[in-house]
DNA sequence: GTGTAGTGTAAAGTGACACTATCTATTTCT
DNA sequence: AGAAATAGATAGTGTCACTTTACACTACAC
C-alpha cells in the first residue's frame, strides 16, 4: 500500500507519519522508485502501537524511540527485555538528585526487603515510589503510606497474571511487544479502573444514612485564588 | 515570612512562585505596602501540594488551576468534591469523539453493570478505560482485557481503603485536599509499585530452570529503524 | 501527452506549555 | 545613605509534537 492508504488505515495524518519515519520510530517504506515507497501491515500495526503508547500511555515520542532502540538491539537478553519498559518510561528528570541515603528511598528499600521482592537498586520505580511517599509525608498524609503493603499485594497479584500473558507468547518479538503493550496500556487500564472504583465507593458511602458517617463542619481556609 | 524565605522553605524559585500567583494557583501574599507582601505556612503547604501534583502526579498547571477553582466554589457538595479530581485530571482532548455506542465503551459499561458499580455515564475514566481496551484489541492483545475483572477487584479494595482515609478527615478543606492528594499521589504510588512487582515476578520466572518455561525462538520482524 | 494527484526530502514554522528574564518603581534592612 | 529585596507588568526561552511550505519529481487517467 502507499502512503495515502497507510494514513487512512491507521488514522494518522501523512505529515505525522513522515515525522515518525524521520524520528526513526517507524521504518521507512520500501522504495520502488526515488520518490515512491510501499508499506505493509507491519507499518499499520506499528502505527497503532505508537499511537497507543503516545495517546493512551501518554509516553513522549523520545521514550517510544528509546524503546524501539532497545527492542532492536540483538544483545538484549530476556531479562533486559522484560525490564526495559521501566527504563524507557522513566522520566530522566524525575530520578535526578536521588541520594542513596534518602529517607523515602530507604523506606522503599525496607518495604521491598519485607516483601522479599527482587528489584535492582537502580530500578527507576524505586525513585518514583520514593518521590510519592516523600510528598505524602510532607503534606501530612502519611496515613496513605500505610496502605502501601495493600497496594503491593494487589500489584503483585496483577503482575503475575500479566507476566503470564507475556510468557504465553512464543517468539521474542511478540513477547517484547507484549511487555510494552501490557506495561503501558495496563497502567492506563489500572488507573482508569481505580478511578471508577473510587467513584463507586464514594457514591455508596454518600448514600448511607448521615448518622453513619462523620459530620462535615465547613471551615474556611486557604483555597482557590483564581482571577 | 517574605518571598525569599517562602522560596527557600518550599524549594521553589521566586520567579516560579510569582508565576503560580499570576496563574491563580497560589494566593497572593498579604500586602503590607504597595510592593511588600508577607506569606505564611499555608503558602508553603500549597506550594508543596502544587509541586507534588505537577512533578509526581505529572498534572498540567491548567488542571491544577481547575482543581483549586472547584475546591473554592462554595456550591461544591461532597459528591462533587469526591468526584472532582477525576474531571480535573481528565484530558479534555482524550474524551474527544467518544460516540456513546462505541464498542469499547459499551464493553466498559457492561463491565460496570456486571460489577454493579455505580458510575455516572459521563465519568471520563469510562472513556479512558475504553481507549485502553480499544487499543489492546486492535493490537491483538485482547487477552489482557480478560484480566480486567481482576484489575477491578484489586482497584475496588484499594478504593475502599482510600475513601476511608478521606472520610477520616473531619473538615471540608482537609477532606478535599485528601481527595486530591490520594487521587493524584495514590496513582503514582500504585503505578510505581506495579512496576516493581512486575520486575520481581519477571526476575523469579527467569530464575526457574529453563525446561519449565516456553522456548524462545528468535524470529526476525519489524523492529527498530533508528538512524 | 498533458494534467492532476500523490510522493519524497529538507527546512522552517506553529501552538501549547512551564517557566524565566528584564524593566521599573518602590521599600526595607544595615 | 546605599545595597538588597519586592511587586507588577511585559516579553522572551526552550521543549515538544507536530505542521506547513518549498521544491522536484512520478504515476496514472483521460
Image (cartoon, coloured by chain):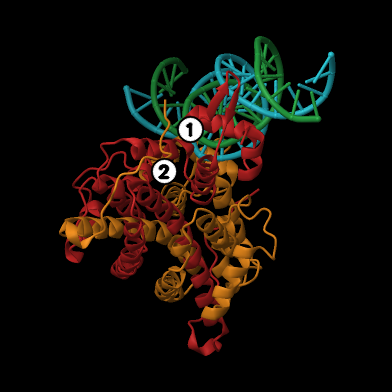
Chain colours: A orange, B red, C green, D cyan
Q: Position of residue B169 (x, y in %)?
A: 36, 56
Density class for disc 1 (Cα within 10 Å; few <14, some 14-19, many ≥20) is some
Alpha carbon distance from label 1 to label 2 = 51 Å
**Vertical comparison of A116 with B115: above or below:** below
Residue A197 vs residue A122, the one in the foreground: A197
Residue B177 vs residue A177, the one in the foreground: B177
Q: Are marks 1 and 2 on the same chain?
A: no
Chain bearing mark 2: A
Q: Position of residue A181 (x, y in %)?
A: 44, 60
Q: Residue at x 37, y 38 (%)?
A: B93
Left or right placement of residue D24 versus residue B173 in this view: right
**Vertical comparison of D16 with B171: above or below:** above
Mark carried by residue A6 = 2
**Vertical comparison of B18 with B35: above or below:** below
Residue B3 in view here: yes
Q: Secondary structure at mark 2?
A: helix
Q: Report which residue position mark 1 lands on.
A: B27
Q: Position of residue A73 (x, y in %)?
A: 64, 62
Chain bearing mark 1: B
The quarter of the displayed image where residue C4 is located: top left
**Vertical comparison of B69 with A90: above or below:** above
Q: Position of residue A141 (x, y in %)?
A: 46, 58
Amino acid at each position: 500500500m502507499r502512503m495515502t492508504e497507510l494514513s487512512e488505515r491507521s488514522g494518522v495524518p501523512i505529515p505525522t507519519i513522515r515525522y515518525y519515519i524521520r524520528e526513526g520510530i517507524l521504518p521507512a517504506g520500501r522504495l520502488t522508485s526515488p520518490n515512491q515507497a510501499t508499506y505493509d501491515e507491519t507499518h499499520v500495526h506499528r502505527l497503532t502501537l505508537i499511537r497507543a503508547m503516545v495517546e493512551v500511555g501518554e509516553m513522549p515520542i523520545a521514550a517510544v524511540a528509546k524503546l524501539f532502540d532497545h527492542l532492536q538491539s540483538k544483545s538484549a537478553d530476556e531479562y533486559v527485555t522484560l525490564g526495559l519498559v521501566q527504563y524507557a518510561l522513566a522520566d530522566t528528570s524525575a530520578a535526578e538528585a536521588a541520594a542513596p541515603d534518602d529517607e523515602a528511598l530507604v523506606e522503599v528499600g525496607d518495604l521491598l526487603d519485607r516483601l522479599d521482592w527482587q528489584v535492582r537498586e537502580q530500578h527507576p520505580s524505586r525513585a518514583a515510589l520514593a518521590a510519592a511517599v516523600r510528598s505524602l509525608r510532607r503534606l501530612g498524609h502519611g496515613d496513605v503510606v500505610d496502605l502501601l503493603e495493600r497496594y503491593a499485594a494487589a500489584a503483585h497479584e496483577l503482575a503475575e497474571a500479566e507476566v503470564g500473558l507475556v510468557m504465553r507468547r512464543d517468539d521474542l518479538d511478540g513477547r517484547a511487544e507484549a511487555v510494552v503493550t501490557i506495561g503501558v496500556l495496563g497502567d492506563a487500564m489500572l488507573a482508569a479502573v481505580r478511578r471508577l472504583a473510587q467513584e463507586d465507593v464514594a457514591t455508596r458511602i454518600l448514600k448511607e444514612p448521615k448518622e453513619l458517617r462523620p459530620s462535615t463542619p465547613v471551615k474556611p481556609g486557604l483555597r482557590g485564588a483564581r482571577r
